[in-house]
Amino acid sequence: MNNNYIQSEFPIEVHNHFEVLPDDLFIPPNALEVCLESFSGPLDLLLYLIKKDNINILDLDISHITDQYLEYIELMDALKFDLAADYLVMAATLAEIKSRLMLPKESFEDEEEDPRASLIKRLQDYQRYKTVSEKLSFLPRVDRDFFIASVSLPKIEHEKNEETLFTKEELFETIKDVLTRPNFKNNHLIDYEELSTKERIQILLSLLKKTNIISFSKTLKQSEGKKGAVVTLLASLELAKEGHVELVQNNSEELFLKSLRSISIE
Amino acid sequence: MNNLIINSVEALLFGSGRPMRLSEIRNILENSGTTAELSEIKQAINDLEERYTNTSLEMQEVASGYRLQIKQDHSSSLSILWNEKSPRMSKALMETIAIIAYKQPVTRGDIEDIRGVSVNTRSIRNLLERNWIKISGYKEVPGRPALYVTTKDFLDDLNLRSLNDLPDLPELENQEGDILSQVV
């Protein structure tokens, strides 16, 4: 049994504590919890005691073990119930073995099996697995002793890669296409005209009645803004088309509307 | 040896990050248009093994196939890099997995008999979650307890190809004869 292996998992103080502990199976109550945790079970503890101190089952003091029973039961509320119970079973087994050995044998014919034999067999069996479990724990283990090598490949496979790769010219052509493509998705809201061309025509005609010629800019209203200018222009063009007015532009940039025939409001 | 096959095998092993069987590699290569015999793939793996001699990599055969590993020499630096602290396995847990590994299939009761202590549900759950053990069936006795066996993942994680690679279980007779004499 490799005690160093066991003890290495616990603080030094506990280690020292154990040095005093195992005169026999009696475990001081304040050490019980540590004891329960540091040994993987009662068989483990028993093996430890046997190896460490050459404990002889025959020498066990049953009264001590009985005292310990009571201590255990008192402590069970706070401790791991299952585990404490396992130790109790072991203590009881030891007590039973001792009491049977101490009984005088009635006759040689009534030879019963040595009560120690089954315990020893269990101890031996346990020892085998304990030894091998220590070997297992020293085997190289993934992510503890060694790591798996891998690289992250692009999600696409190699061949597809070739297809999806493109040149910078293609990239340029694509962005050009995208930028010049009409935006079909834009919304276009059709709205009522705020300013009607027909109405504007009437206004222009009535203006032209008074003066034969007016400058385009004079007919515009500041408040109507661009829309006003557009509507007025449309009205002017409509009038010119119908032959009501002539659009005259001299050297200046100003556009003039000149009445052609006598204007009558229809 | 065809370099294409060697490199393709390497790429697959690198990309998968897990063990791959020769047949799996062959099927994938075939689907991608490279026909190769199993023997050729095995040869490629041998060639890669050789190629890695003076590198940080190594080829390892485990229960689920072949995989690429980083040589153990670099584990200490990688542990720092990934701040990897693989959870410590308690003695109890190691004893439990050892008993399952060597005596499988076993019930919880079998484990308890050997260890002389009740088996914590957490231990079994821990091993199931690691995917180191699985339930192979139920024993036809009252209560129908689950029978546990080890998995390929268990072997993979310990760099083993099969259960035969496990360390030998000490013989019952010769082992610890001194205990017998001491106790009796």
Image (cartoon, rainbow, N blue to C red):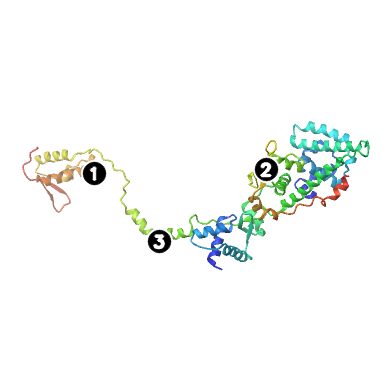
Indicate the quadrant where residue A111 lies.
Answer: top right
Reading the chain from its start, which is encountered first: label 3 or label 1?
3
Of tags 2 and 1, the one toward the viewer is: 2
Asked whether B12 or A172 is in front, the reply is B12
The answer to whether the residues at label 3 and label 1 have Cβ atoms under 8 Å apart is: no
Helix, strand or loop at disc 2?
Answer: strand
Position of B137 with respect to A76 (left or right) is left
Image coords of residue A232 (percent x, y): 18, 43
Position of A244 with respect to B180 (left or right) is left
Helix, strand or loop at disc 1?
Answer: helix
The answer to whether the residues at label 3 and label 2 have Cβ atoms under 8 Å apart is: no
- Gap between marks 2 and 1, in whole Å? 88 Å
Residue A36, above or below B98? above
Work out which residue is located at the far bottom of the displayed protein and give it: B1
- Gap between marks 3 and 2, in whole Å? 63 Å
Q: Residues within 10 Å of mark 2 (few under 14, many from 20)?
A: many
Answer whether residue A143 is visible to the viewer in this image: no
Chain to which the residue tagged by mark 1 belongs: A
Task: Name the amino acid type tagged 3.
Answer: Lys
- Gap between marks 3 and 1, in whole Å? 44 Å
Task: Name the amino acid type tagged 2.
Answer: Leu
Do badges 3 and 1 share one subunit?
A: yes
Q: How crowded is mark 3: few (under 14 residues within 10 Å), some or many (20 or more)?
A: few
Answer whether residue A110 is visible to the viewer in this image: yes
Image coords of residue A40 (percent x, y): 76, 43
Q: Name the residue under label 1.
A: A226
Asked whether B122 or A206 is in front, the reply is B122
Asked whether A232 or A79 is in front, the reply is A79
Q: Name the residue under label 3.
A: A168
Q: Mark 2 points at which residue?
A: B147
The answer to whether the residues at label 2 and label 1 have Cβ atoms under 8 Å apart is: no
